[in-house]
Each structure stands twice: as structure tokens, then as C-alpha cells.
Image (spheres, coloured by chain):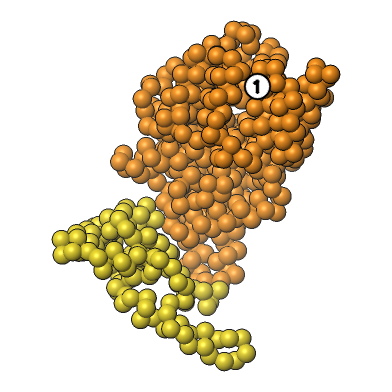
Chain colours: A orange, B yellow
Amino acid sequence: MSADEVLAGVVRDRWGRLVAGLFARFRRLDLVEDALADAVEAAARTWPRDGVPASPAGWLYTVAVRRVVDRLRTEAVAARKHPLLVAEVERRAGSETMADPGGLVEDDLLRLVLMCCHPAVAPEVACALALRLVVGVPAADIARLFLVGEATMAARLTRGKRKIAAAGIPFAVPGADVLPERLGVVAQTAYLAFTAGYAPGSGADLLRADLAGTAVRLARVASGLRPEEPVLRALLALVLLQHSRRDARVDDVGRLVLLPDQDRSRWHREEVEEGSRVLASVPAGGTPLTENYRLQAVVAAEHALAGRAQDTRWDRICAAYTALAEVNPSPSVRLAHAVAVAERDGAVAGLAALDGLDEPLGRSHRLPAIRAELLARAGDTMAAASAYERAIALCGNDVERAHLEQRRALVIRRRG
Amino acid sequence: MRYTILLAADPAVWDAAGPEERRRIMAAHDAFDAEVLARGAVVGGEALDAAATATTVRHDGQGRLVVTDGPYVELVEQLGGFYVVDLPDLDAAVAACALLPDYYAVEIRPVLDVGELSRS
């Protein structure tokens, strides 16, 4: 392995632990992240020349500690503080090797995750902080994931770090009475980051689906820290199964490919298998949040395990959506349920299941797009064409609009 | 950490409360006090008279002072009181605030060290 590959690997696998260890020691989020970024930069410069150190993570930690101490010393001098305070900085610098590589570091990582995903931190800020500090995603990539400019994302991260410090958000694992709820917030944060990667953008969004993979890593880290927590396992199963289809969603020329038409050989089988395995370990009947993720994962697993589109077990998917609507009665769940009903019982039944969704989903292109599809299947091409018109007018995403225009042209041609 | 805890509530709830309900509200404040004392200290706090008794003072930007009747912002929920507490962290503050009467909206604000501010 080249020095660059070793560095990329250690940044990918150890970043969160390094941040957590440095924060446990210095309690300065603002300095810790910069110091670690400096250390990575130094490694990129020196490792190819001098060789990879025996303990790459230990090397980064040591260099980052020196950087933080330098900054603290500069601050102490700038504030013209008593020489004793400078001496205190020196003392805290102490030994420059990593204190404990084992269980304590894992505890620190859990503390870091809980601190970033604290309910007092706004969800979009928590996402950014967790991806940056726990997973080590560059700020520019997080900006692309959330469709905001790099300056906006930098400001969001700074705001988050300041909120944590100023509000006194603890670097601690709360008691057993509060912990499950807090792990629920962790799951929601990771899922929000994940869905951002699949949210319709204005251009082609292949790259952003790739970035959703960073949220899968966040879900994996969280679940690894608390493997017995059902909500984290349900979430991990869900994102693994949904993300396994990413490469089949868009064809070679950037057009959207819907589930039935996807080339199933392009689904990531190992992720489907892992997701299914994790899903099987989540008991039914958990908290509403756990059930929300578990039942969506059940749907994703049914799709993933069907060898061909026509082998899909729509009765099971309908049952999962019916149960999902109990814990998550949102219009989008009812819409998905209607689609499943159409597959099980035919287009006319599906159209009936769309009743009552016009008001809550009036501004989304998805409802008219689905109605158009079902009307076309039911043979009402006039109504289908006009529903496609409406969907095209409401759609804000290039890839999806191109798909809708293609469908409308097809329906009109068939009629003619 | 020092926090100021701002208590906002619809005053109509207290006005309409019977003696039993009022005892329950006061007991919630006692429970809050006990929780804060267990983890830190109550530094201060006051209950405030109705927002209708407030007077707001502003400068109009042309050097004149404008004194008006009423609070600086009119809402159904009004500032009804505050505590100043010393607690280890935000979770401790949230745990204590959870014990306050359930019709309150409670805002937890970290207190700045003004001495530190003027030196920096």
C-alpha cells in the first residue's frame, strides 16, 4: 500500500476516534478539528518521503496534540496571561502518545457522536457536525450533499461548534433513562444526512448519492458503538438496503431508471446481504422510530431480494406499508402504499388509493407522476397525458423531468 | 456553567387555575429547585408581574426616547419569570427544566461573563 493509501485509510477509519481523543483532552472543538486537518496535511507531505510510521494513527494524534498546544500557547501569550497559565498549557500537553487505544477511546467516540447529535443542535447542523467530526467528511463534500455553498457550510459548522461550547452541551453518555431517546436522535441525524444524498437537486445527482454513503458510514459507526440498540440497527439495515441500488438508479447517459427497469446486477449484493442480516436481527414492535426504519427496510429488502421485478412480493410490501402508516401516517407513506396496492391489485385500485392525497401533496410532482402512470396503465391516455403535464410543470429536478417528458411522449404516441 | 432560565407561559392558565392546580404548579417549582440544588445552585430568580404592567423604553433613532405601555413583544406566551442557575452542563439544565409546569415554554440561555467580554 502506498503512503497515500495508508493515510486515506487511517483518515477514513480513525478520524472520529482521533477527534474524540483530542477533544477529551483539550475540550476545544475549534482547535481540535483544525489541528487534526493540519496533521493530515503534514502526513501527506512527509509520509511519501520519510516512510509510513509504525503507528499511523498515533503519529497523527501526536502531531495534532502539538498543534493544539502551539495554539493554546499562542492564545495564552496573546491574552498576556500569567506565565503560570502558559506553564499549565505545557503541563496539559503532557505525554504526546495516545493514552488508551481500547475501550476508553470507544467511550469517547460515543460521547462525540452524542454531542454532535444533541437535540439542542439543529438537525441540519448536527448532520454537518457528525459527518465532519465523526466520519471525517471534508466540509466541501458536506456542502455538496446538502446543496449549499461551501461558505454556508463552513458557517454552519462554526455555528454548531460554537453552540456546543457556549450552551454547555456535555461530552458525556447520559443515563439509561435518557440514552435510548438520544440514540434515536443519532439515528434521525444519520438518516437526514442519508436522504439529503437522494433529495432531488437541480442537476444530475449521481455524485450526491455517492455522498449519501458517508451517512451510511455514520450509521455504521453509531450502530457499532451500541450494537444492542434496535433503532440504530434498523437504521443501518434501511440505509444499507436503499443505498445498495445507487448505481442502477441512473443510466449511462444520466437518465433516471425506475425500480422495475433497473439492472439488478448493478445492485451491491454484499450490501443487500449485510442489510438483510442486520434487518433480521431487529425485533418487530419496537418504538415508533424503530418501526419506521424497520418497516421501510422490510420494503427495501423485498425489492432487493426479488430476482426480477415481476417476482416482487407486493402483498408483503402492502402489509409493510399498512403497518408503516400506523407509526408514520405521512402523505408520502400513503403515496408509496398506493403504488404497492396498484402493483398488487391493479391500476384502478391504485388510483382509488390515491384519493385524498391531492391536498397534502398538491405541490409535489410525485403525485401527478404516479397518477399519470396508473392512468396510462388503466388505458385512460388523455387523462394520463394531462397528469404528466402537471407533473412536468411541478418537477424541479432535471433528471426526473427528462424521465417524465419521455413517459408523456410515449403515452401520446401510443394514443396516436 | 451559569444559565438563565426564561419562563414563558400563557398567563390565562394561572389566572384560571383553582387552588389545587396552583398547588401543583408551585410543587413543580419546588421540584425544579430540589433538582438544581442536587446538581448545582440556584443563583437567583424572580416571578414577574403581568406583561400588561410592563413598560418598554426605546430610542427612536433621532435621539428621542420613546416610552410605551406593554412588553417589547406581544405574544400569547409571555415572560413570567426567570431563574439563574449554576449547573454542570446543558443536560443537567434540561433535566431540571423538565420538572417545571408543563404549560411553560422554557428557554435556557448560557450567561456570558461580561468581565471576560470587556477584556477580549
In which chain is the residue bearing label 1?
A
Residue A404 horizontal/vertical position (percent): 75, 28
Q: Is residue B13 above or below residue A373?
A: below
Taking the image as shown, residue B63 lies to the left or right of residue A208, namely left
> Is any atom of residue A38 visible in this view?
no
Give the residue drawn at x 57%, y 11%.
A312
Looking at the rendered structure, the secondary structure element under dot 1 is helix
Q: Residue furthest left?
A: B20
Q: Quadrant of the N terminus of chain A?
A: top right
Give residue A342's quadrant in the image. Answer: top right
| Residue B74: image location, x then y, percent | 45, 72
**Looking at the figure, which quarter contains the C terminus of chain A?**
top right
Q: Amino acid at mark 1?
A: Leu
**In the image, is A216 to the left or to the right of A409?**
left
Q: Is residue A227 above or below residue A344?
A: below
Looking at the picture, tell me which residue is in the foreground, A258 or A356: A356
Kindly indicate the quadrant of the structure image that contains residue A395. Answer: top right
Residue at position x 44%, y 68% from top?
B75
Residue at (55% x, 14% y) in the render: A345
Residue B82: x and y in percent read: 34, 69
Q: Which residue bears the numbered disc 1?
A: A374
> Which is nearer the eye, B2 or A391?
A391
- Residue A162 visible to an observer of this rendering: yes
* Relative depth, front residue between A339 and A359: A359
Q: Position of residue A64 (x, y in %)?
A: 59, 47
Q: Quadrant of residue A268?
A: top right
Please report the residue visible at 43 percent of the width from the left and 64 percent of the height from the top: B110
Q: Please state if A290 lies on the left or on the right of A74 as rendered.
A: left
